[in-house]
């Protein structure tokens, strides 16, 4: 079984470490800052194998130069975005073998937050960058609402027990919005309690399970009557598709 740990960076980022079973071999996801990564590697005597990049924003890429200088490792990332030192450009594909110590990976194209965003699925764990957040989703910063809605629908059809590893600690704020959209959703209310408890203890609210997102994340619930009604109330007119509901929710959340 893989060992996965969060390395905090900046105010609310997580850089994910994926460690191979019975091994010191390590994959590093979205290293926006090299310093905490190097510190954790040295403390645990880990062996970096590769960097996995989901999209081009600097809080996901700024540590690449120092890490490849120090460890001389390959950089995997989206083929259609400008990723520093990219050595292995990727788009949707299955059975990518990075190293014999790790299970094969599937790459998903999940544009919307940015135009070329990708996600990595490995052994039932989805590293989705800023596409899907716990109880939320990314802003439109280069892609379109149509793209992001389609990307979230792609993720929604993965197995319910898929673990979701996004890269920001936004869960409490996202749940406040989710509760505004669905004030009668008991699962959202319980998730708020559970998340508040985790954060008081200084623990990450991540990962989440896809089934939890399907039950509490309004951006994955655009066909639910209460979500449709709330989105229509915000927009001031009828919405005739789940994409239209999603677009209204995204606009609402932008100024929430």
Image (tube, rainbow, N blue to C red):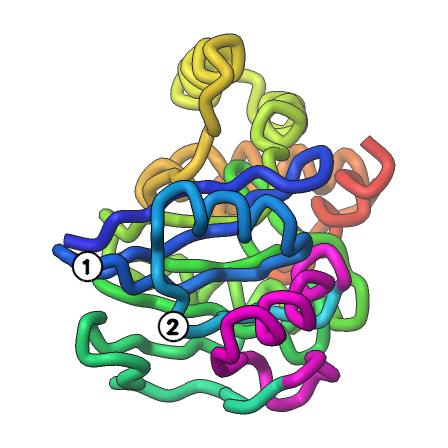
Q: Which mark is residue 23?
A: 1
- Please name whichever residue, 62 or 108, is drawn nearer the observer in this view of the structure: 62
Q: Is 36 left, or right, of 102 in this rendering? A: right
At 67% from the left and 67% from the top, the residue drawn is 66
Q: Position of residue 13 (x, y in %)?
A: 63, 43
The image shows residue 30, relative to residue 3, as above or below, that is below
Residue 126, quarter of picture: bottom left
Q: Is 211 left, or right, of 242 in this rendering? A: left
> Could you say whether the residue bearing mark 1 is in a helix, strand or loop?
loop
- Please name whichever residue, 24 or 234, is drawn nearer the observer in this view of the structure: 24
- Within 10 Å of the Cα at label 2, are there few (<14), some (14-19), or many (20+) other Cα atoms? many
Q: Position of residue 81 (x, y in %)?
A: 70, 83
- Please name whichever residue, 165 or 75, is drawn nearer the observer in this view of the structure: 75
Marks 2 and 1, how far apart in space?
11 Å
Residue 155, quarter of picture: bottom left
> Could you say whether the residue bearing mark 2 is in a helix, strand or loop?
strand
- Please name whichever residue, 206 or 243, is drawn nearer the observer in this view of the structure: 206
Q: Which residues are magenta?
A: 58-85
The image shows residue 26, relative to residue 255, as above or below, that is below
Is residue 242 shown to the viewer in this render?
A: no
Is tag 2's residue or tag 1's residue first in the polypeptide sequence?
Answer: 1
At 66% from the left and 60% from the top, the residue drawn is 60
- Within 10 Å of the Cα at label 1, are there few (<14), some (14-19), or many (20+) other Cα atoms? few
Q: Position of residue 28 (x, y in %)?
A: 46, 61
At 67% from the left and 26% from the top, the residue drawn is 173
Q: Please check the rendered image and state whether residue 18 is part of the magenta-colored stretch, yes or no.
A: no
Instruction: Name the image quarter holding the C terminus.
Output: top right
Determine which residue is flagged by label 2: 49
């Amino acid at each position: 079984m893989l060992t996965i740990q969060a390395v905090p960076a900046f105010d609310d980022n997580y850089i994910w470490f994926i460690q191979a079973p019975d091994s010191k071999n390590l994959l590093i996801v979205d290293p926006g800052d090299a310093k905490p990564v190097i510190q954790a590697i040295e403390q645990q005597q880990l062996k970096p194998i590769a960097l996995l990049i989901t999209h081009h924003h600097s809080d996901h890429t700024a540590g690449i130069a120092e890490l490849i200088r120090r460890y001389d490792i390959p950089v995997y990332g989206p083929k259609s975005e400008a990723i520093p030192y990219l050595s292995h450009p990727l788009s949707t594909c299955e059975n990518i073998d990075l190293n014999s110590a790790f299970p094969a990976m599937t790459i998903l194209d999940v544009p919307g937050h940015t135009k070329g965003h990708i996600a990595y699925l490995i052994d039932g764990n989805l590293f989705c960058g800023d596409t899907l957040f716990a109880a939320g989703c990314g802003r439109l910063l280069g892609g379109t609402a149509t793209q992001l809605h389609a990307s979230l629908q792609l993720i929604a059809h993965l197995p319910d027990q898929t673990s979701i590893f996004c890269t920001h600690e936004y869960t409490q704020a996202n749940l406040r919005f989710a509760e505004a959209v669905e004030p009668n959703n008991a699962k959202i209310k319980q998730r708020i309690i559970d998340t508040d408890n985790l954060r008081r203890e200084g623990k990450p609210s991540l990962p989440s399970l896809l089934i939890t997102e399907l039950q509490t994340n309004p951006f994955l619930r655009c066909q639910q009557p209460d979500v449709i009604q709330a989105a229509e109330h915000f927009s001031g007119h009828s919405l005739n598709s789940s994409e239209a509901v999603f677009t209204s929710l995204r606009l609402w959340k932008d100024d929430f």
